Image (spheres, coloured by chain):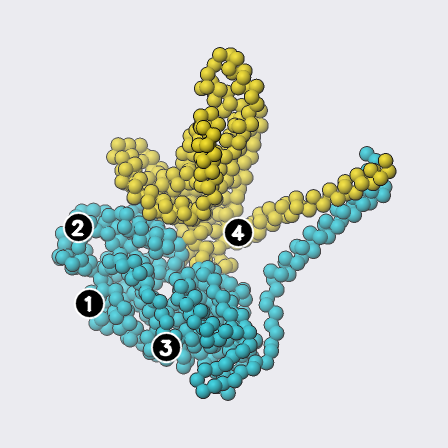
């Protein structure tokens, strides 16, 4: 009663006002903090070149992120790179390709990593923001078809043969049983039972789905009208024969637990978990197993003249890599990509990124299951793409070889 | 006297500082709702309410409607609550009425441990262990004997509404049960004595006690519901992730959190797809709010 009096009344309001001011300050602080991009402090770099290795002593922090597929290999590259250049710190967030690209566009990451090249819409956004960006392939991927057919033994019945057309029809629900004449015709060594095919696919948005659907779109045009993307609307789900597994481990578990099912995983996962994969009919009509050699021999047949220039829109490049000609070529092959700005104002950052990319392309320390780019692609990237990186308009490679 | 007065004065004034955390919480909740709404405006403008009423998720043609996920969320959480009610009630009663002291302590610790497990562990356990086990025994049995009921009318795969519901039911049981257990142990001794005085036995004591703490039981399940409907990873690993609306709980389905966790990593932001995901998150929030309001209403009426 006696507390709320004139003097104390003022004190009461004072406290309320102080609290409101405090909250405003905190809020404003958080707001500006979340909006402030990293302040750039251009410093002159001190570099000395020895005969083979460049000494780079400026301390630089590079933030990268995106694809979860590339993460184990990326961490390996980062550790090895740190040994060479202790002053450069690189952090990689394994957040997913889409998020990686979005954060690259928001200036959170200096390097975005994506299992697919930027779609035209995002590429336009990036060009608008950074004037020019460079898309750089960093590693090779492939997609394998896995299956679970009780009684089917590859060493007796011969490996399971598949074609793009049959896969397209399975995932659209046109082929619903294993004893379909089209499947029987290319697998004469096994008597298929009249069992429903359970079609397992990825439920999370994934570069694997992107590559598989793009392959079906390219190699089985007339049977695949669903389009391609990280996620598609699987017609087989609405028939009740589709299952969505989260991640490659989810797909593998669902295929393993459900007899008469079929699914797809990336090459790396199939190798590490020693899964039985099907043979796919390639462009020249041969049934080819998923092996390191069949993937690399496909890439030998890439028409480099069709490859886009460094700063071009790369959105169509995945389709160039699929269903490649050649007797021994495995048909579903892809790259994973790094996306960088063409020009960095911070000269040290530009040099650090250049050195890191060079390390990625030339380093031989590749983890089991991953495939390094073949030499023809590495040469293409080194000569036509890395040379394009600039620091304030100055090509970075000229700064280094000085 | 004067001195005491001034101390009291300052204490009273200082106590206004306690308003600070309250205000921060209000601001946080408010800003979450506002940012959810702002992020989903794009979807409402382009898709209208079809983002809730159609069943299509097609990034290729840029059309989104999460009806299957909304349906699945409700089905899965209902199964989970149905499973969790007998489990958590009987656990609470057993701990308070029957368990010897040592066993009681052990069981309480185990139950608390269950509540603190990372949910991804439940998910992988469900995916690799429970799914093949239940498919081989329970699901197949249900299908073979009861497939004339629409609830069990599809041949079992393993991952399904039912599997996700069972996993979720196990996960939320420690939460519901710990609240019921604690309230149960606070029941005044006079009630127990009264029941004994009437010459009634243990069964009647339990019945009277349950009635006595009815509203706490309901709020225990509301908390469990809130935790259940937002569960992402464990459900995403076990629900089958097929955009599928069917009365059969043996069929694979989808839930809103599973859809969000599956899609967000590969979604470009800002985009219509991200906006549609935010719209679904907003709906999840609304469902939770409505559930809490209903529970409050029921509790108030009960008293």
- Asked if labels 4 and 3 touch by Cβ distance under 8 angstroms, the answer is no
In percent of width and height, residue A292 lies at: 27, 68
One can see residue A144 in this view: yes
Name the chain letter of the residue that bears numbered label 2.
Answer: A
Front one among A24 and A249: A249
Q: Residue at x 46, y 76 (%)?
A: A84
In percent of width and height, residue B289 lies at 54, 39
Is B123 on the left or on the right of A9, as rendered?
Answer: left
Please say if B1 is above or below A335: above
Chain containing mark 1: A
CA distance separating discs 2 and 1: 25 Å
Q: Chain of mark 3?
A: A
Please name whichever residue, A177 or B184, is drawn nearer the observer in this view of the structure: B184
Whether labels 2 and 3 belong to a single chain: the reply is yes
Chain under numbered label 4: B
Give the alpha-carbon distance from disc 2 to disc 3, as whole Å.
44 Å
Closer to us: mark 3 or mark 1? 3
Name the image quarter holding the N terminus of chain A.
Answer: top right
Above or below — where is A176 with respect to A207? above
Mark 1 or 4, closer to the camera: 1
Residue located beneath label 4 in the image: B40
Q: Residue at x 24, y 48 (%)?
A: A259
Q: Which residue is mark 3?
A: A378
Residue wearing tag 1: A286
Q: Earlier in the sequence, mark 2 or mark 3?
A: 2
């Amino acid at each position: 009663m006696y507390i709320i009096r004139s003097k104390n009344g003022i004190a009461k309001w004072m406290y309320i006002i102080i609290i409101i001011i405090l909250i405003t300050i905190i809020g404003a602080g958080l707001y500006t903090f979340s909006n402030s991009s990293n302040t750039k402090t251009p410093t002159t770099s001190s570099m000395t070149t020895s005969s083979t290795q460049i000494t780079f002593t400026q301390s630089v922090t590079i933030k990268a992120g995106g694809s979860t597929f590339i993460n184990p290999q990326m961490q390996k590259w980062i550790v090895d790179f740190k040994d060479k250049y202790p002053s450069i710190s690189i952090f990689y967030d394994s957040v997913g390709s889409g998020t990686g690209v979005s954060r690259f566009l928001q200036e959170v990451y200096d390097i975005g990593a994506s299992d697919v090249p930027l779609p035209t819409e995002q590429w336009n956004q990036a060009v608008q923001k950074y004037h020019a960006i460079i898309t750089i392939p960093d590693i090779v991927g492939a997609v394998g078809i896995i299956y679970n057919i009780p009684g089917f033994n590859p060493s007796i019945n011969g490996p399971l043969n598949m074609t793009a057309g049959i896969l397209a029809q399975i995932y659209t629900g046109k082929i619903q049983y294993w004893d379909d004449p089209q499947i029987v015709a290319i697998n004469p060594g096994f008597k298929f039972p009249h069992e429903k095919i359970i079609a397992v696919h990825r439920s999370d948005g994934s570069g694997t789905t992107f590559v598989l659907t793009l392959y079906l779109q390219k190699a089985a045009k007339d049977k695949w009208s669903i389009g391609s993307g990280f996620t598609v609307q699987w017609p087989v789900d609405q028939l009740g024969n589709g299952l969505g597994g989260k991640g490659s481990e989810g797909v593998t578990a669902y295929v393993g637990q459900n007899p008469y099912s079929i699914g797809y995983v990336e090459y790396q996962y199939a190798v590490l978990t020693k899964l039985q994969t099907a043979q796919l009919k390639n462009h020249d009509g041969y049934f080819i197993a998923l092996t390191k050699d069949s993937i690399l021999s496909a890439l030998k047949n890439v028409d480099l003249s069709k490859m886009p220039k460094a700063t071009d829109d790369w959105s169509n490049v995945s389709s160039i890599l699929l269903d490649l000609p050649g007797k021994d070529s495995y048909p579903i092959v892809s790259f994973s990509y790094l996306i960088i700005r063409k020009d960095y104002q911070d000269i040290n950052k530009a040099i650090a990124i250049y050195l890191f990319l060079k390390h990625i392309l030339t380093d031989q320390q590749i983890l089991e299951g991953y495939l390094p780019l073949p030499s023809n692609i590495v040469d293409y990237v080194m000569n036509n793409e890395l040379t394009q990186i600039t620091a304030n308009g100055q090509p970075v490679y000229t700064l280094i070889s000085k | 006297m004067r001195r005491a007065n001034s101390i009291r004065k300052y204490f009273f004034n200082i106590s206004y500082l306690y308003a600070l955390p309250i205000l921060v919480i209000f601001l946080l909740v408010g800003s979450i709702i506002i940012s959810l709404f702002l992020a989903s405006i794009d979807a409402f403008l382009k898709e209208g309410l079809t983002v809730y009423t159609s069943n299509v998720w097609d990034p290729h043609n840029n059309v989104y409607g999460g009806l299957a996920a909304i349906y699945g969320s409700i089905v899965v959480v209902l199964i989970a609550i149905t499973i969790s009610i007998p489990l958590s009630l009987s656990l609470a009663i057993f701990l308070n009425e029957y368990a010897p002291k040592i066993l009681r302590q052990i069981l309480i610790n185990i139950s608390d441990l269950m509540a603190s497990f990372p949910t991804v562990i439940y998910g992988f356990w469900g995916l690799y262990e429970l799914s093949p086990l239940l498919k081989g025994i329970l699901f197949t049995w249900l299908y073979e004997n009861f497939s004339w009921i629409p609830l069990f009318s599809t041949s079992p795969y393993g991952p399904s509404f039912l599997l996700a519901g069972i996993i979720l039911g196990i996960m939320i049981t420690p939460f519901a049960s710990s609240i019921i257990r604690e309230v149960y142990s606070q029941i005044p001794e006079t009630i127990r004595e009264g029941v004994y005085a009437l010459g009634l036995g243990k069964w009647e004591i339990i019945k009277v006690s349950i009635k006595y703490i009815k509203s706490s039981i309901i709020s225990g399940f509301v908390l469990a519901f809130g935790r259940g409907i937002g569960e992402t990873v464990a459900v995403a690993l076990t629900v089958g992730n097929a955009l599928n609306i069917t009365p059969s709980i043996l069929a694979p389905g989808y839930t809103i959190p599973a859809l969000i966790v599956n899609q967000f990593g590969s979604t470009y932001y800002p985009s219509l797809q991200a906006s549609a995901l935010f719209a679904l998150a907003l709906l999840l929030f609304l469902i939770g709010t409505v559930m809490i309001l209903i529970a409050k209403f029921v509790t108030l009426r009960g008293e």
